[in-house]
Amino acid sequence: MTSLPLLSLAIFLPWLGAALLAIVRFAPNSARNVALGFSFTTLLVSAALLSAFDPTATGLQFVERHAWIPSLDISYHLGLDGLSLLLVLLTGIISPLALLASRNDARDPRAFHLLFLLLQGAALGVFLALDFFHWFIFWELSLVPAFFLIKLWGGDTRARGNPAATRAAYQFVLYTIGGSAFMLAGFAALFATVGTLDFTQLAALRADGTLAAQLGQTWTWIIFAGVLLGLAVKVPLFPFHTWLPPAYAEAPTGVSMFLTAVMSKMGLYGFLRILWPLFPAELHAIATPLLWLALSGVVLGAFAALRQTDLKRMIAYSSVNHLSYCLLALFAVASAAQPSASAAASAFSGTLLQMFNHGLSAAALFFCIGILETRGGGLRGLNDFGGVRTAMPVFAGLCGVALVLLAGSPRASTAFIGEFLIFRGVWGLTPWAAAVATLGLFATALFLLTFWQRVFHGPRRLAVAGFADLSKQEILVLLPVTVLMFALGLHPQLLIRLFNPLITQWAASLP
């Protein structure tokens, strides 16, 4: 175990890069290089964490704790387990690739990259903080740069004022701040009663019954409802999903990649880190209605994607579908009166694999659509292209692989393994829910195959004839993600070993 404060370095090195960009007036290319270098530090720190991480341990590692506001018993408290490490690794992989994807954007690169580094550091803070006080600061700080990145750099740049991007940015921030307000109120009531905001202390108080005794039934339910609403909006859980498709569709390509790969996992992380340990009985009590909402996201999200003609909105709705699989698994475990440990472990393992795989594959597809949009002069409709594979064979090959892997091709994708484990777990807990959810699988395969057929096959459109194949920079973004998805599909144990002891502990501790 290293003595370096690696977790603090992971969070604050991107912010140091943002501060440097704010102070020094770099030339555009220099600003891009500086930002890329500081963004890449997350991957370097992740590698150091991975090399020193003990996968057999179930407790928190690399813990950093310092008194911050002693009068309120608030500490600067960071820690990492298999769940956190998985998401830090994902952030370290996606962030520099998203910046590379945005490298040719000539609109004020210094400001763009400054905001992106702020967003990256805030997301890492959410995955590593263990005291609600600064966890919530990171949670809310992530909204500010995301709002400006969507509003100022999103949408059709040829449209004056980018009205669609502006609407999407305001919808995104109002939804998420609204949900966060309920969560903040809930934790304020929690602090007023028990005097601590530390997640580990609160979990211990819940485990020995002290938390429920001090809060009482009414306040426990009120606080639970506030926290649930804040996290449900962030994931998002159906029907709180309506902010997601416009935000993802109007964001610039690199930001769409980060939103779908990293920020969408913040809500799921909150379910596993906060809601599950602190409110297991309340979650069990309403798990069946929540299970129906998750099923709605699985099925309706897939069919909504099937109805889209805008390619970015299609993949945005597919994100609702794929994230709902994770919620389906969690709520299936919570709904069971006497859950099987093996079924619960399968559901949990599938959820974590699905989170990681979706981050890679959806980010790759948003980048592919960004390439089409750039080549087509802003066009990104399902019917705007045709015969692209004849003009761009390398692009067609890599994008086709991403589509197949997102669809869950057996033995070649963690998507298949993650979804298989989710369905195996859900079938062992609530078979009827697994049966209904298969409708989403069929619709997912159908809209992804439609994407492949309409864009890459058929008669070549006139504009497509002049499309150039991938540049070296674009290959540098797309190829590593594709290779990594293949490698993890063939050897999923590379990921599973990081969190398997933790998952086993979770399953064994279920009531």
Image: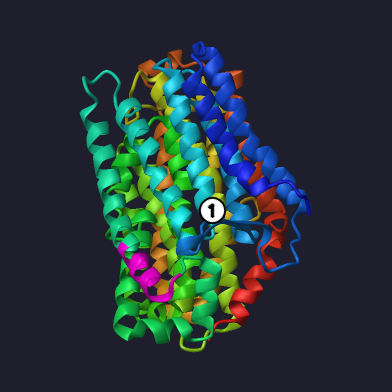
Question: Does 425 sit above or below residue 356?
Answer: below
Q: Is residue 108 left or right of residue 208?
A: left
Q: Let me know if residue 189 is in the magenta part.
A: yes
Q: Count of labels shown?
A: 1
Percent from the top left, x then y, of residue 26? 52, 13
Residue count near mark 1 (Cα–Cα under 10 Å), binned few <14, some 14–19, many ≥20: many
Q: Residue furthest top?
A: 27
> Residue drawn at (41%, 74%), measured in percent from left and top?
433
Which SS type dominates the magenta stretch? helix
Query: In the figure, residue 162 lies in which quadrant?
Result: top left
Question: Residue 491: which quarter of the image?
Answer: bottom right
In this view, the residue in front, 446 or 258, is 258
In the rendered image, the residue lying farthest to the front is 71
Please indicate, yes or no, whether residue 460 appears anywhere in the rendered image: no
Q: What kind of residue is marked 1?
A: Phe
Q: Quadrant of the N terminus?
A: bottom right
Indicate the colouring scheme.
Answer: rainbow
- Residue 297, placed above or below residue 161: below
- Horizontal and vertical percent for residue 152? 32, 26
Say what secondary structure mark 1 lies in.
Answer: helix
Q: Is residue 198 visible?
A: yes
Q: Is residue 269 left or right of residue 463?
A: right
* Residue at point 57%, 39% (across, down): 12
Magenta part of the protein: which range? 185-195
Residue 201 in the image: above or below residue 96: below
234 part of magenta stretch: no
Residue lying at 66% horizontally and 45% vertically, measured from the top left: 486
User: Where is residue 341 shown, x and y percent of the image?
Assistant: 60, 81
**In the picture shown, does residue 482 fall above or below 125?**
above
Question: In the rendering, at what x and y percent does residue 455 appear?
Answer: 41, 32
> Label 1, on which residue?
127
